[in-house]
Image (cartoon, helix red, strand yellow):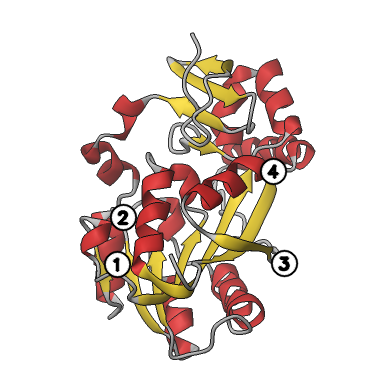
Amino acid sequence: MQMQCPICESQETRRFAAIRGIEIHRCRHCEHGFALFSQHYEEPKIQEMYSLEFSGYRNDPYYQNAIREEIRTNILPLVTPPARVLDIGCGNGEFLLAAQEAGYTVLGYDVSQAALTICESRGLPVQGGDLMQVSSAGSFDIITLWNVIIYLSEPRRTLQQAYHLLRPVGLLVLRTSILNRREMRVVRVCPRLAFPILQIPSQLHFFSESSLEQLLGRCGFQQVQRLPSRRLHSQPRRTSLKRRLKGQCLRTIRAYARADVMHIACQKPAHH
């Protein structure tokens, strides 16, 4: 059964992986991949997945240093403080803290109550609920999404909302993984590896360069600029021998798959 691509709306899609009732389809036109398991992403499930125990909220000194370097090399040359910054999917607030230290006026947004609780405990301004209620139209100079868009059930709607919240000539800075043929080959040969390789069930979308650029264009963004990319997170610590061996096996497989990363900045036009 062919499904409509959520990015380019083409009907030319095909299933390329299925495991445990979860299907991954890919568009023949823009090469976008998407998972079909909406029942896994009801609101209560989101709160369970991104609880206080979520590994992404752990203290990571490597990330703290890397995100400050990211601001220094990629954000400051584009927009200088005290510009207003909205971070969508702010997590534990590390980027907000670093941006605040650099002189920016920051606000974080997240759907996870645990993330909001952590940020509030650190004295950071954050909001949840409806993204469109965060502020009035044209309020922000920069909106960032750090490895967030692949986990959104409706990425187009979120980017449309970001476009609405940006001022004219405001910037969207986005970083995300890109599905490549090596990853697809691994998943086809061994579907069980779809979970660790493709981060299922949390990951819902698997962008190609083409599908991401098409999505940004359909949402009104222009002047897509590729930014230098660096590793942001350290490897999580594994305590038991079994976990260490499992982690080493996965790292070996991922080294072959070598997931690509696309890091871009694009602009809302002056007149829209």
Query: Counting residues from the N terminus, which is met first, the one under dot 3 or under dot 4?
Result: 3
Q: What amino acid is at disc 4?
A: Ala
User: What distance separates the C-alpha of mark 2 from that of mark 1?
Assistant: 8 Å
Question: Front-most of 173 and 147?
Answer: 173
- Within 10 Å of the Cα at label 2, are there few (<14), some (14-19), or many (20+) other Cα atoms? some
Disc 3 vs disc 4: Cβ atoms closer than 8 Å? no
Mark in the foreground, 1 or 3 = 3
Residue 90 visible in the current orientation: no
Spot occupied by residue 245 in the image (x, y as percentages of width and height): 66, 37
User: What distance separates the C-alpha of mark 3 from that of mark 2?
Assistant: 31 Å
Disc 2 vs disc 1: Cβ atoms closer than 8 Å? yes
Residue hosting label 4:
259
Residue hosting label 1:
118
Q: What amino acid is at disc 3?
A: Pro
- Residue at 46% across / 35% down in the picture? 204
Residue 1 placement, left or right of 175:
left
Residue hosting label 3:
228
Question: Front-most of 76 and 11?
Answer: 11
Mark in the foreground, 3 or 2 = 3
Query: Counting residues from the N terminus, which is met first, the one under dot 1 or under dot 4?
Result: 1
User: What distance separates the C-alpha of mark 3 from that of mark 4?
Assistant: 16 Å
Query: Counting residues from the N terminus, which is met first, the one under dot 1 or under dot 3?
Result: 1
The local secondary structure at tag 2 comes to loop
The local secondary structure at tag 1 comes to helix
